[in-house]
Amino acid sequence: MSGHSKWSTIKRKKGANDAKRSKIFSKIIKEITIAVKESGPDPEGNPRLRLAIANAKGSSMPKDNIERAINKGKDKDSSNFVEYTFEGYLAHGIGVYVECTSDNQQRTVSNVRSIFNKFSGNLGTNGSLSFLFDRKGVFTIPLGDLDQDEFELEMIDAGAEDIEMEEGFITVTTAMEDFGSLMKKLDDLGIEPENAELRRIPKDTSTLSLEESKKVMKVIEAFEEDDDVQNVFHNMELTDELVESM
């Protein structure tokens, strides 16, 4: 199982926890709100909103919550969210990339810096870690009753770079520029992914001991617990031993 599948497995396990599910819903609501403010409330003419709604459904978010988020985005007096990114290093030289969505920059900067400082990390300047990551589209799709061979051919035709299967789910990875065409192919096939997103995939990973890895994961979880943080990416190798321990 590669890092893509392992990370998807970890996210699914976290999402099964009610408290974590609430965090996931909060992140999706922000994404829906931003998408509506950017390009309007019609999913047909707003690819970002269409993707956010698909992820909401994949996370079993109630329809009422989705509609409230769309209405919130239409409200001119509601909070204006802005996206921020932070890059730096954690213990043992692990690079980390933190994506945030916030209506209060000062609070977000303060919180992110505090986590770096608390765990002896180093916050760098934007762009300082760009050489460590590639931006890729990653789709997590329930296998269900799909014909796996036929499905893989369709995905390759749409631009898939890598296809993996693990625990009843298929993880499809594509270049960022092919993200839209693969999403459209899934729409044409009537297949709804559990999750579809642009991830920062490390070009190389660093392998740590189990104890060292657990300490790094503790920092990553501290970032993820912050309400302003949407995604956290890193270049630590997710060993089978680490995944099993989680």
Image (cartoon, rainbow, N blue to C red):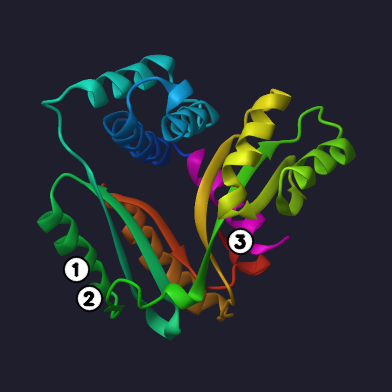
Q: In this view, does 132 lie above or below 177?
A: below
Foreground residue among 97 and 185: 185
Residue at the spot x=46%, y=39% of the render?
17
**Residue labelled with disc 2:** 117
What span is in magenta? 1-16
Q: Is residue 163 magenta?
A: no
Q: Mark 1 to mark 3: distance in Å?
A: 27 Å
Residue at the spot x=63%, y=28% of the render?
192
Q: Does the magenta stretch include residue 13?
A: yes
Residue at the spot x=59%, y=35% of the render?
194
Q: Which mark is residue 114?
A: 1
- Say if residue 190 shows up in the picture: yes
Kind of residue sitting beneath label 3: Val
In percent of width and height, residue 113 lies at 20, 69
Q: Is residue 124 above or below residue 190?
A: below
Say which label, 1 or 3, has the lower sequence index: 1
Q: Is residue 44 above or below residue 130?
A: above
Q: Which type of secondary structure does the marked residue at label 2 adopt?
A: helix
Can you tell which of label 1 and label 3 is closer to the viewer?
1
Say which label, 2 or 3, has the lower sequence index: 2
Q: In this view, does 211 lie above or below 40?
A: below
Q: Residue 243 carries which label?
A: 3
Kind of residue sitting beneath label 1: Ser
Q: Do the residues labelled 1 and 2 touch (CB within 8 Å)?
A: yes
Q: Quadrant of residue 7?
A: bottom right
Q: Is the magenta stretch mostly helix, strand or loop?
A: helix
Kind of residue sitting beneath label 2: Asn
Quadrant the C terminus occupies: bottom right
Can you tell which of label 2 and label 3 is closer to the viewer?
2
In percent of width and height, residue 170 lies at 72, 44
Quadrant the N terminus occupies: bottom right
